[in-house]
Amino acid sequence: MHDLRTYLEKLEAALPGQLTRVTEPVDWRYGVTARAIQAEKTLGNPALLLNIKGHTMPVLINLLGTVDRIHLALEDAKLGGRLAFYSDWNRLFNNDLEPVQVKSGPVHEVIETGTNVDLETLPIPWFYPEDGGRYLTAGLLAARNPEDRGEVNLSFVRMQLQGKDRFGVSLHSRGHMWQYYERAKAKGEPLEVAVILGAHPALSLAAAAKITDEYSKAGALTGEPLELVRCYTVGVTVPAHAEIVLEGRMPFEEMDEGPFTEYTGYISGRSTRNLLEVTAITRRRDAIFQAIYPNNSAEHLLLSGLPKQARITRALTEYTHMQALHDIVWPTQATHFACFLSLTEAAASTPGLAKQVALLLLGLDHYVKYAVVLPAGVDVSDPGQVLAAVARRCDLKQGSGVEVLGGVYSHLLDPSSPRGGLSGKMILIATGPEAPRTGPVNPQAKLKDVKALNHPVEGAAQLLAVTAAGALKPASLLDAGPLRPCRLILLVDPDIDPRDPGQLVWALATRSQPDTDATIDGGRMVLDARKGPGWTAKRATEPKAS
């Protein structure tokens, strides 16, 4: 049977050194986060199995922090990066295997109901000081469609501990679980749910695909039917080999929840403010508590992104009249808001095809604000190469190398959106001939309100990052004589390292609106990625390891 433990065994055999067991006790208050931050800065970004002070149950975090570890969850995975994962996902995804129901399983080795329910016995982390409290981040909320009991949905939702038997919950207001909740409310019956913690990663991937009937999809991804057991106190079925299941009901009362550190890298107070009352805790005797490293971590962004990206990549391949796509990546630095793709030589030289592919991408992925099209020779996984290619090879003119759209459907958590759920979008076609090379700007050049001038990519003098006070007008940079050689100028706040292309991409993705923050003139462009007037979003404070 495929479960979390068989996956961990497979991981240690296939990718030695990518699971680190930390024997030194770690505090659930910020200590788990501090260790995860350290891991992400370590070569290989290993998964962590942590001992928690005051608890006998270990915490597993950052398990899915690399593409290879996610890929390993699929049947007959042949590891080889993003494109190999996309290929295997698309090969398996539609081969549904219906789950089978069994009478019992390891998840029912320990059963606690009634007054014995105590969620505080679980090592639930408090991730960041600005968070509202302790959060479940890896829990899969399972429920049946109140209008079609045969349909089941699993959703990732954030859940804040509010007492021994309750959570404050934020459902995604455009998602399936929100629809189930609204249908239950219309019937006047609390929604019965179960929270699954610690299943085989294929089930987490199926849930991240934002579909229904994820149990069948998990079977498709592993090549083996998932074994399910019925819950004790609610009419929901759950994986028999899960580590922990929390059973409960969602009545129609509001419960304050948040703020929480979201995938954008900022604290979010947005919440649907729902209540979950827990009626039972069932678990293995030696259960492992799984958490997902929140914030704009690689684990959070890869898990939530790769399943969708695989299907989009397939569509981009199927709906172009010739082989066009060479490589594609949604860089984690851009928190889902940018996509970099490269075209084959034939596609790049076909008039209008690059723009057509980019438009198709924007139609398929409402998160993306910046779609950047590049030639095959550019490594799309390297933000520095991508920015340099735009500065050198994009005809920076509206209607030529640049297309800008305004007021397009987008994601609600973009902190730069003037109206939630709407955003500007930009297409950058960087497949043209290289512009003449120029010398670097004198970093000591004196310009009013400019704090620093930096070329973030060595040898790419056409690309400049400018750190400036809020009073600086972007158009003044295009008029400044010392900056004439620069074709693409990125304007950033002092908290952004202008020498780090990854931070520059993050600033562009989360602090700019392409339709209002781009100034284009004479084949040159300034993108203003500074926090605008009335900006309220805050970054979390990084805890330090004790």
Image (cartoon, rainbow, N blue to C red):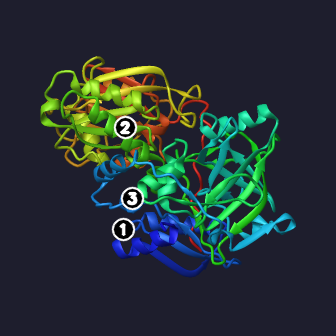
Give the label, 3 or 1, closer to the camera: 3
Please give the residue where the numbered disc 3 appears in the rendered image: 74
Seen from the viewer's position, the closer of residues 106 and 515 is 106
Foreground mark, 3 or 2? 3
Looking at the image, tell me whether mark 2 or mark 1 is earlier in sequence order.
Answer: 1
Q: Residue at x 67, y 57 (%)?
A: 135
Q: Earlier in the sequence, mark 3 or mark 2?
A: 3
Q: Residue at x 76, y 64 (%)?
A: 119
Picture quadrant of residue 18: bottom left
- Dot 1 crowding, Cα within 10 Å, few <14, some 14–19, many 20+: few
Amino acid type of the residue that numbered disc 3 sits on in the rendered structure: Leu
Q: Position of residue 269 (x, y in %)?
A: 67, 42
Residue for badge 2: 312
Q: CA distance from mark 3 to mark 2?
A: 18 Å
Horizontal side, residue 23 vs residue 231: left or right: left
Q: Amino acid at mark 1?
A: Leu
Asked whether 115 or 487 is in front, the reply is: 115
Q: Secondary structure at mark 3?
A: loop
Residue drawn 63% across and 58% down?
238
Residue 432 horizontal/vertical position (percent): 16, 29
| Secondary element at image label 1 | loop
Q: Residue furthest top?
A: 399
Question: Can residue 499 be spotted in the picture?
Answer: no
Q: Which amino acid lies under the numbered mark 2 shown in the image of this protein?
A: Ile
Is residue 155 visible in this depiction of the protein? Answer: yes
Q: Which of pointers 3 and 1 lies earlier in the amino acid sequence?
A: 1
Say which residue label 1 marks. 43
Q: Residue at x 22, y 42 (%)?
A: 460
Nearer the camera: disc 2 or disc 1:
2
Whether pointer 3 and pointer 2 mark residues with C-beta atoms closer than 8 Å, the reply is no
Horizontal and vertical percent position of residue 83: 29, 49
